[in-house]
Image: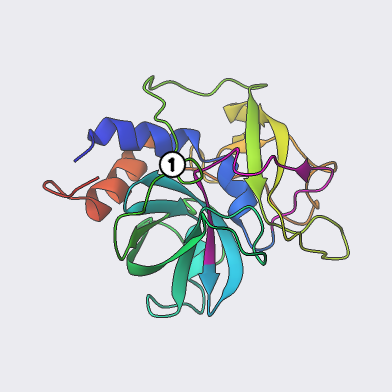
Amino acid sequence: MADLSTFLTTLILLGVALCAAQPRGRILRGEEAKSHERPYMASVQVNGTHVCGGFLVAEQWVLSAAHCLEDATNETMQVLLGAHSLSQPEPSKHLYGVLRAVPHPDSRPDTIDHDLLLLQLSENATLGPAVKPLPWQREDREVAGGTLCDVAGWGVVSHTGRRPDRLQYLLLPVMDRATCNLRRATPGARWCAAAWPWAWSPRDPVCVATTRSLASTLVWRAMPPGSTA
């Protein structure tokens, strides 16, 4: 099993990037990513339709958003890896079933506080140039305000709701923790990207993430001692 603190740090630092995983998420003023430049990207699908983005964080684990479980079960959820285009054939694409879904214990459907979800794939992902886990951030530290965050996904790209077929990305600065906590959030329960109105619709909050202690609870529940990472 990978070191717990490693998973914990990754959950913390990936909080902002998870904004792109929300089905209501928007990547306005973004641009198409280079094909397979982000081999950790995952498309979480329900009954064959993309609903959320995610990140491959270990060979059998994908990190996404807890609200993606709405109206979904393990039987209807699948994870697509190795994709740049959602619709076009690509030799690197592979669809995996979901063995179990583990939402953050404090996630709620009416808020995006602690909006984190770990999905255990039905089998280890086949790794290659287009499918790789996100490299670990080894240093456990607070992300400073102004740090650029790489937001990527297949979220809508216009106010009319147009959805892209190919992966989009955008660089956004992280908002400092104190300012983020003023935005109707549980203190410490979110990270913020200083994005709107350029990257996101104002009606959709851009804060997501979790505290260290709660992230630890999530990872420990999903990957108990003896699990294979």
Find out whether residue 36 is within the magenta segment: yes
1 displayed left or right of 155: left
Residue 5 percent across, percent down from the top left: 28, 31
Name the quarter where the N terminus is drawn: top left
In depth, the one of 178 and 1 nearer the eye is: 1
- Examine the structure image and report whether residue 226 is included in the region drawn in magenta: no
Query: The magenta stretch spans which residues?
Result: 25-44
Which residue lies at the image location 64% right of the left edge and 50% below the top edge? Answer: 20
* Depth order, front residue of 226/95: 95
- Name the foreground residue: 29 vs 97: 97
Furthest toward the front, the residue is 91
Q: Is residue 223 left or right of residue 131?
A: left
Q: Secondary structure at mark 1?
A: loop
Question: In which image quadrant can residue 104 be found?
Answer: bottom left
Q: For residue 199, which quarter of the picture?
A: top right
Q: What secondary structure predominates along the stretch shown in magenta?
A: loop
- Give the residue at the far right of this rendering: 160
